[in-house]
Amino acid sequence: MQFDIKPILQDLGIQAENEAAGTGQRWSSAGENMVHPVYSPVDGQQIAAVKFATTEDYDATIKKAGEAFKTWRTWPAPKRGEIIRQLGEALREHKENLGKLVSYEMGKSLQEGYGEVQEMIDICDFAVGLSRQLYGLTMHSERPLHRMYEQWHPLGIVGIISAFNFPVAVWSWNAALALVCGDVCIWKPSEKTPLTAIACQNILAGVLKANNVPEGVSCVIIGDRAIGELMSNDTRVPLVSATGSTRMGKAVGAAVGARLGRSLLELGGNNAIIISKDADLDMSLIGAVFGAVGTAGQRCTSTRRLIIHESVYDEFKGKLVKAYGQLKIGNPLDQNMHVGPLIDKDAVNSYLDSIGKIKAEGGKFIVEGGVMEGEGYESGCYVKPCIAEANNDFKIVQHETFAPILYLMKYNSLEEAFALQNGVPQGLSSSIMTLNLREAEQFLSTGGSDCGIANVNIGTSGAEIGGAFGGEKDTGGGRESGSDAWRVYMRRQTNTINYSDKLPLAQGIKFDL
């Protein structure tokens, strides 16, 4: 299936043959030794080349963003919301082409590419409403003729470090809220998916220019981990929001914490679905298979473990094996395909390494894995989703492998199932499939899940923007997107106004002159 990406790149304002890394509205000054080719995992073809930014480019971008913040913070929040409303409209206009670029550059299915852009549109709609709801509280003072209240102020520059698997949605979760709150944003996307970031910057830049918003309110800077390290150690960036592996998040958290900055960390997951004896097995099958193979297992919310009651274990295992036998693996732009490629050959090697470790620890494969070969698989990035029976305490099971590998394990009592679910270092998403109300309530209310997300009768994957997204333990503790996640992008200030002709002190303290 031949795919012509050039018209899409042109529509999104990207010069594919010599694209450089955008820093605000300027190009990187990096030399030729910093040129980075961009390949599609779909067909292995080079899409473009970008230039990585230098330390000088980074510093210039920070200064430009700092100047823009001085003006942007003075705009009334509803006026800032109007800018985000227009961004949402622009994304609607470009949804098809941006969705195709997400699919081609990252490798997820076209429907998931469209879904990711829709997620951006949804968070813009959410942020527009939020722009009129940045509430503070009013408190009664113990002192006569005094009033106390709290208000929220923008932090300043928000640094956003995003991962390849959701190359645009996670940026929008942060940027839409941060911009409405009065912050300015500097985005370091994954070096594996820079074109989607440049496309988003171009779309937003058009909106900003049309509304005379200061240049620097939103900036993209392309680079490798060196840019992330600069951002993490920079006291001019009060908040760093980082999405990626636990290893990366620990490094970012330590660097930001050492300077007493703030970090919002959304890191790895090792998500489980408990399949109860009282589950609807056909519905459970859909949730389990999509959770395990969607985005080729490269979601932080991907289903890694199925904890199945022993009385339905064999029946459900049989359904899984049959379903996996029907999966179509191939070009994700072909909507008949269920599973696309992994992001690159390093990911393939990690997948193969994990399979070897599963076997070494005694795991038994009931659906074998392997790398796809032949016509249509020339990129070398297509792999077979596989299923292994394994123990929860296997070292490899405790580790998150970003690939479509699913582990099965049995349980007898509900307490045992909960212990297995919670018995991993990560704590992002979880689910129980049951029609038993008592089981569902115990899962949600009595420690059945120690994750940030706990679902009943839906899978671990596919969160809506209305709820706060994030997890506990090695997942980092951060919350993005909906609910009151906006507060992390602002600082709280308590104010007391004395409108009397005296100056009484709190706690009845006397201080007379």
Image (cartoon, rainbow, N blue to C red):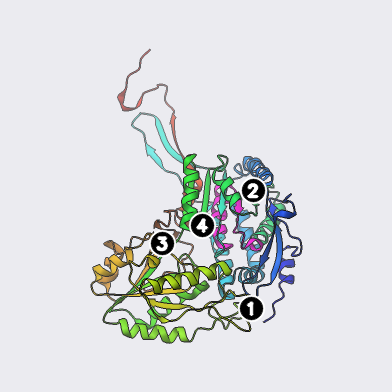
- Label 4 neighbourhood size at 10 Å, few (<14), some (14-19), many (20+)? many
Contact between labelled residues 3 and 2, with CB atoms less than 8 Å apart: no
> Element type at marker 2?
loop
The quarter of the image holding the N terminus is bottom right
Looking at the image, tell me whether mark 2 or mark 3 is earlier in sequence order: 2
- Amino acid type shown at disc 2: Val
- Label 2 neighbourhood size at 10 Å, few (<14), some (14-19), many (20+)? many
Residue ID for mark 3: 428
Q: Based on the displayed image, in which of its 4 quarters is residue 360 positioned?
A: bottom left
Q: Based on the displayed image, in which of its 4 quarters is residue 8 positioned?
A: bottom right
> Element type at marker 3?
loop
Contact between labelled residues 3 and 4, with CB atoms less than 8 Å apart: no
Q: Is any part of residue 476 visible from this angle?
A: yes
- Amino acid type shown at disc 1: Glu
> Element type at marker 4?
strand
Contact between labelled residues 1 and 4, with CB atoms less than 8 Å apart: no
Query: What distance separates the C-alpha of mark 4 from that of mark 3?
Result: 13 Å
Looking at the image, tell me whether mark 1 or mark 2 is earlier in sequence order: 2
Residue 86 in the image: x percent, y percent? 64, 59
Residue at point 50% right, 74% down? 294
- Label 1 neighbourhood size at 10 Å, few (<14), some (14-19), many (20+)? some
